[in-house]
Image (cartoon, helix red, strand yellow):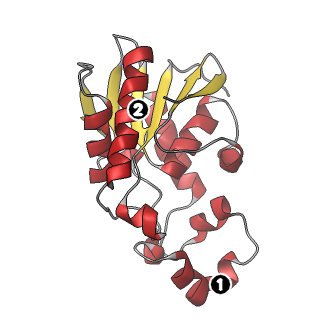
Amino acid sequence: MSRHYPPLYILRHGETEWNRSGRLQGHLDSPLTALGRRQAEAQNAILKCHAPADAVAISSDSARSVLTARIALAGLDLPLSRDARLREVALGDWQGMTLDEIQRDWGFLIEGRDPFDWKFDAPGGESLADLAARARAVLDGLTGPTVIVTHGLTSRVLRCLALCRSPADLGQVPGGQGVVHVVEDGTARVLSA
């Protein structure tokens, strides 16, 4: 069953130290890099041109998302709340590990698989269905235009759901840091500075 959602302005947090070094974060955190701060500033410039005055903003409660939100929303006077349901997928035993470490210890689980798929099979981690349920609960509670600051996989799942696509299609929607994904009236577009 499809649902009509209000306009969504979805941002991924800026680059972190662990993004740069190839270390998976999941529910763990890592500080923004200088590039990550510049990416959030670029998102601010985009939002200043496109975000409706009556929008509200919600962010994952992860520090990297909250800092990105503060930078991206500077000067916009949008109320900001935090929501743990917008966290990145929990990666269980793989949180804090590099791709090389995962390949070495769990290569049999990831060999030859789509990188958007195998992350949901992390030992002790969260499934795609779990993440999709969290994302759907957030979307179902929205009442007006909303800026959402979240994470890579969570952003993709949110957009799939808002576009009435299966969450399994997450690899088919664009990603990116420093951009704003807009979903409105059943269509999606990417805004960049």
In the image, is residue 39 above or below residue 171? Answer: above
* Towards the viewer: 118 or 176: 176
Residue topped by disc 2: 43
Residue 94 visible in this rendered orientation of the protein: yes
Q: Amino acid at mark 2?
A: Gln
Mark 1, secondary structure of its residue: helix
In the image, is residue 193 above or below residue 127? Answer: above
* Towards the viewer: 175 or 169: 175
Residue at (54, 38) in percent of width and height? 158
Residue at (50, 35) in percent of width and height? 179
- Total marks shown come to 2
Q: Which mark is residue 156?
A: none
Q: Are marks 2 and 1 in contact (CB under 8 Å)?
A: no
Q: Position of residue 175 (x, y in %)?
A: 58, 44
Front tag of 2 and 1: 2
Residue topped by disc 1: 107
Q: Residue furthest top?
A: 53
Q: Position of residue 31 (x, y in %)?
A: 29, 58
In the image, is residue 92 above or below residue 51? Answer: below
